[in-house]
Image (cartoon, rainbow, N blue to C red):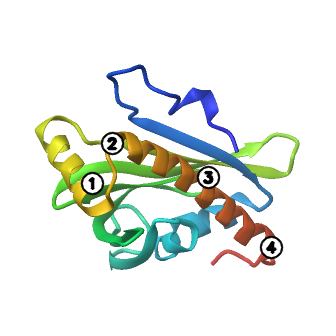
Amino acid sequence: MTSPGGRGASAPAGTRTRELSESILIGASPERVYAAISDVRRVADWSPECVGVLLLAGRGGPHATFLGFNRNGSRRWFTHCRVTEANAPHEFAYRVSIAGLPLAVWGFRLTEAEGTGRIQVTQYWHDLRQGARGKAADLLGRVFAGTTPAERVRVNRAGMAATLHRLRSALETAPERPVP
């Protein structure tokens, strides 16, 4: 696992980490990896925090919307998500909000790892909580998820590592089937 380019490295005192990324190499075709990450119904298969998804519109293409049901210990909450990037087999991303307040963009980038026959999968997170609406979203994060902004960075970094390992495990242990 790597954190490319130092993204998400400890922020100087008084500043807030607004971006994280983690990467892993996966021995599967880019089409197969993309099919897995863009099927939003499977987010809960990879994520340690998401426990379920309700697809509202679309299937994972541009502008598809879904609810993500999340858990952190005994705390439970849901978020509204909208696909913002669906560029097969290179990038998939969605914007997350709660109670109409923007929280983050979550996404995946896929690149060929030259000479390895593997795909580098980078998961990224961009914090959208800013200004007065950001403060309200921070408060909701404390109430529902039980995390402060600084704790959210730690939780997300650990969650990204777990997500990527689960994704790799699923894709490398199951036989490759044609992508529909």
**Of 52 and 42, which appears nearest the observer?**
52
- The residue carrying mark 1 is 141
- The residue carrying mark 2 is 149
Give the amino acid type for the residue marked by disc 3 in the picture. Answer: Ala
Alpha-carbon span between mark 1 and mark 4? 36 Å
**SS assignment at label 1:** helix
* Quadrant in which residue 93 is drawn: bottom left
Which mark is first along the chain, 2 or 3? 2
Give the amino acid type for the residue marked by disc 2 in the picture. Answer: Pro
Alpha-carbon span between mark 4 and mark 2? 36 Å
Determine the residue positioned at 40% across, 45% down: 151
* Mark 2 surroundings: few (<14), some (14-19) or many (≥20) residues within 10 A: some
**Of 65 and 20, which appears nearest the observer?**
20
- The residue carrying mark 3 is 161
Which mark is first along the chain, 2 or 1? 1
CB within 8 Å, label 1 to label 2: yes
Q: Residue furthest right?
A: 115
**SS assignment at label 2:** helix
Determine the residue positioned at 37% across, 72% down: 74
* Mark 1 surroundings: few (<14), some (14-19) or many (≥20) residues within 10 A: some
